[in-house]
Each structure stands twice: as structure tokens, then as C-alpha cells.
Image (cartoon, rainbow, N blue to C red):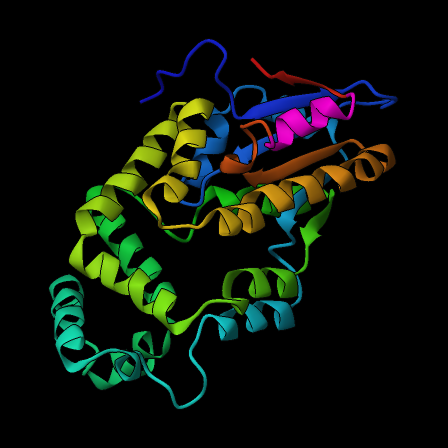
Amino acid sequence: AFYGSANAQLLYKISGNGLKSPSYIVGTYHLAPASFAEEIKGMSDAFAAVEQVYGEVDMLDSQSSQLAMVQAMMLPEGKYVSDMFSEEEMTRINAYVRANIGMDLNHPMLREQLGRMRPSVLAMQLGILEFIKITPNFNPNDLIDNYFQKEARKRGLSVGGFETTEFQIELLYGESTDDEEREALLKLVDDKETMLKDMQDMTNAYFSFDMEGIYELTIKGVDTGDMTPEEFREMITDRNHNWVNAMPTIMTSKPTLFVVGAGHLPGNEGVLELLKLQGYKVKAVK
């Protein structure tokens, strides 16, 4: 799958504009294995050249922050997925869950575990199970998102995050309506082929270092109506601007490896172009 073009890369060097030492930025994908970091050209040298790693959020933050995120992924106390759907819809949902797990949400154990999740979170978990089936050796507990911060701590490097856990909770779930939650789960149950194709397409683009393909798939949700332009702005564009505004101070204090979702890098308002507009040299590491 590694057929990327000559200019394709996931790791970029940031220099100039008064920086005494270069920093780096790398794009990740939440379904890529940690081992894929070794396939990114120049990654080892970049790690050796920096003194800190900055992610979207400190993934190894306090236990209280991690607990807050887990709690935000669950429905309010006493509420279950079955309370949000009609009897006919629950029949479809349970048939799907039973086909994938062997039990449905009527089972007491699953009712208290999966049945307490927000429908959008349940859809994500079930989607990952589908992905595991078609992806040999996929290990959801050893993914690239966590790799860089864990490796930083092993090397004695400091770790930071652009955003707090509280901010991400509000971003992901703060304005989510019941209708949006319901739609996320029913879309998977009624059309898993489209979901799997989107996951596989993004995986192929990422493994191919195909930034153009990653960008096209990132904005696809707006074209298909799965995401409104306002939601895209909140999820992608506004955050890109916030991060780039914070990066000069961070890079001046210490040479830094920034680690963010690959979908944030390309595009006219992607992190790479915004850094160039600030006067930095941004060069793909070959």
C-alpha cells in the first residue's frame, strides 16, 4: 500500500522565522498501528532532535481527566440506548449487534456496558469491531495516536497538549442532539458498507502518505451532508488556527514534535499552509 507520490509525506520540518532550532509536525490516523511510526521517513531523526512532544491533548493526563472523558461517552445515569429508539429501530440495532457479537443489547451484561453508551460512541465501537474483522493483526490497544507521547515519556521528553480534555468533551458532545446521536448509530446499522469503505479509504490514503487523498476524505463529510460547514469549521478549521497561533511560543521555548490528526495538515486553512503564512519554512521530510 506504500505507493505515495514523490512529494507525499506525513512528517514535516518547521524552520525559519527566528527559530534557533527546527521543530517538526507529524500527522496521525486513529486506526493506524503504533508500528507504522517506523515507516514514516525521518521519524527517528526528528525524535532525536526535539525536546518535547505536543499533541492535540495530553493523552496520558490525570486519571480524573480520563475518567471525565469516559463519563462523557456515556448516557446520563439511568438512561439506555433503548430509550432513544423505537421498537422497530431497536430490532434492527439488536440484529446488527447480535450478528457481530453473538449477543444483543437485551443481554444484561451488554445492556449495562454497550447499552449505556451514547449511540454515536456505540457506533464508533461497533465500527472498530467491523474494521478488526477485515484487518489482519489489528490491535486497538496499540495505535499510533498514543505512540508518540508514550515514546516521549520513555525518552524523558516533556509532553503537552493544545487542548484540555474538558474542551474536547465540549467539542465532541456538548452540542450533540438526540437526533444526531440516533442518526450516527442507524447509519452504521443500515449501511455499514459505506462506513467500512470510508474507513478503508482513509486507511489506504494514510498508509500511502497521500495528503491530497486525506484532505479529500476529510472534507467529504461536508459534501455528503454528514457534517455541516459550521461543524467542519469547529472541528477542523478553527482548531487549526488556534494551534498555529500557539505554536510560535511553544517552538521558541523548545524544539518540538507536534502530533495531530493528519486531516488537520492539508488544505488552504490546514496547519501546514497557516504556518507558511506566518513566515515559517515547512518542508516534507524525505
Name which quarter of the figure residue 50 lies in: top right
At a point 48% along the width and 46% down the height, the residue shown is 229
Q: Nearer the viewer, residue 127 or 263?
A: 263
The dominant secondary structure in magenta is helix
Number of numbered callouts drawn: 0
Tell me where residue 135 appears, x and y as whole percent. Answer: 25, 41
Farthest residue to the top: give it. Answer: 6
Tell me where residue 286 appears, x and y as whole percent. Answer: 56, 13
Q: For residue 154, say whether it is visible.
A: no
Q: What range of the chain is rendered magenta? A: 269-279
Tell me where residue 23 appears, x and y as whole percent. Answer: 73, 27
At a point 84% along the width and 21% down the height, the residue shown is 17
Q: Vertically, is 61 above or below 75?
A: above
Look at the image and tell me in which quarter the N terminus lies: top left
At a point 38% along the width and 23% down the height, the residue shown is 208
Q: Is residue 99 left or right of residue 128?
A: left
At a point 78% along the width and 31% down the height, the residue shown is 255
Q: Vertically, is 47 above or below 243?
A: above
Q: Is residue 224 left or right of residue 148?
A: left
Residue 275 is a magenta residue: yes
Name which quarter of the figure residue 138 lies in: top left
Name which quarter of the figure residue 32 lies in: top left
Residue 140 is a magenta residue: no
Tell me where residue 80 appears, x and y as whole percent. Answer: 33, 83
